[in-house]
Amino acid sequence: MSVRRIFARPARFAVIAPYLWMVLFFLVPFGFVLKISLSQTAIAQPPYVPVFELTQGAAAIKAAFAALSLDNFRLLVSDDLYVLSYLRSLVVAGVSTSILLLIGYPIAYGMARLPRRWQSVAMMLVIVPFWTSFLIRIYAWINILQHDGLLNKILLALHLVSTPVVWLSTDSAMYLGIVYSYLPFMILPLYATLAKMDPALLEAAMLANATAGISVGKQGTATVSRQELLDALHLDDLVTTDRKVASLDDAIERVSDWHRRGLKVGFANGCFDLIHPGHVRLLSEARAACDRLIVALNTDASVKRLKGPSRPLQNEMARATVMASMSPVDLVTLFDEDTPLEMIRALRPDVLVKGSDYTVDQVVGAEDVQSWGGKVVLVTLREGHSTTGTIQRMTAPAET
């Protein structure tokens, strides 16, 4: 017997197992329910006829099949009570599902966008109610909603109502119970879908939306050229430049999302007071070493401590805006300390980029990045390009 056949058998059993489960715990019980629905009530044990007696032979079984009828279903559609009850159940199901979606989707979306280390905590908070008895939770809600329950006490204390509100045995209580019971079943599938969503699908949807927006702006049936789409995307890039500038908390959230999507995150830092060709090369090579590039800028106070009271020439927001407009840069953030060590530890980048005027052991954060499996990239600098040199040439007296 080949190795492939040996390993193929467990795989086949694994595929068959769910179908066996469905047959045993869905189709078989469904068959019993279907048979009872086609029977007629009787004062007997069991309380319906016909009864299949396998011991009485094929003729008895055939007669039992012949005695089955659709009378119960005809009664359902002929009696207004049953029809109205069925329509009412559809309304309740529709309203409950809508409420569950309105509440569950934002929660699931928020969970999917949480940093990876907090997602398991959020899932635990959703699942924890399952660890207690369903009846205990329902009785707790009854105590909260009853005439002298906690909810009415709070409303009376806040003077929002003058008399206790009747909550129990109302539609509000019914919807509350349904939403409370089924909310985890709405959140978890949505969260699983959102967390695993392929970034390429989001990009394709964005491109399709941009193309449609251009097309509907034309008369009649029109096509969209490649250049028109590129121009629209470029305009959108200009609008989103400000979105690249983020606080540390926002940066942590975005980096977590990038990591969750399997993207390699790079990190570079500096004052970047006046952008020159050396900076452009550093950013380009840094972006080539990763999928997403973060640039951390020293704040004005940090630059003054490092460079002197005459620096920076541009304030921190001006420098951040210029940096955010650079195509290799995906995110810009600011740090007020003398070094970005704490920021590096918070963001946990995969690639740490610095100029070749440093050695690896001199790069701040190099040891930390290497400890979690990252690497340090030293970019060869272009000679003759520096902000200090540019300022000196600008302020030097003109030769006569």
Image (cartoon, rainbow, N blue to C red):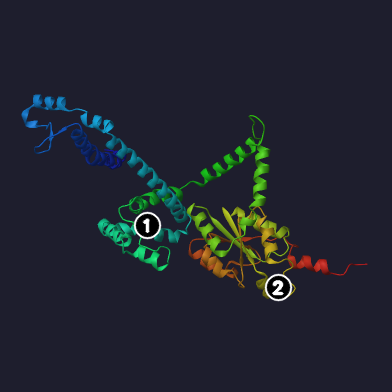
Looking at the image, the residue that sits furthest to the left is 56
Numbered label tally: 2
Check whether the beta carbons of the residues at disc 1 and disc 2 lie within 8 A of each other: no
Q: Which of marks 1 and 2 is in front?
A: 1
Position of the N terminus by quadrant: top left
Q: Which residue is drawn at 45% across and 49% down?
A: 194
Q: What amino acid is found at the position of numbered circle 2 in the picture? A: Lys
Classify residue 74 as left or right of residue 251: left
Of residues 157 and 340, which is closer to you in this image?
157
Q: Is residue 341 above or below residue 49?
A: below
Position of 308 with respect to 153 (left or right) is right
* Residue displayed at 6% across by 31% down: 55
Circle 1 sits in a helix, a strand or a loop, which is it?
helix
Q: Residue 253 location, x and y as percent?
A: 52, 59
Element marked by disc 2? helix
Point out residue 373 in the picture as x, y percentages from the top left corner: 49, 61
Q: In this view, does 389 lie to the left or right of 15?
A: right
Which residue position holds label 1? Answer: 126
Residue 72 pos. (x, y %): 22, 32
Name the quadrant containing residue 86: top left
- Along the viewing direction, whichever of 279 and 173 lies nearer the viewer: 173
Q: In which quarter of the image is residue 385?
A: bottom right
Instruction: Kindly report the distance in space between the C-alpha atoms of the residues bearing marks 1 and 2.
Output: 51 Å
The quadrant the C terminus occupies is bottom right
Query: Where 100 falls versus 120 (above or below)?
Result: above
Instruction: Return the disc, 1 or 2, that comes first in the chain's sequence.
Output: 1
Badge 2 is on which residue? 307
Which amino acid is tagged 1? Answer: Val
Instruction: Tell which residue pokes out farthest to the front in this image.
Output: 162
Query: For this rendering, which residue is in front, 387 or 374?
Result: 387
Query: Counting other residues with Cα less than 10 Å from the Cα at mark 2, is it few (<14), some (14-19), or many (20 or more)?
Result: few
Residue at 78% x, 65% y: name it. 390
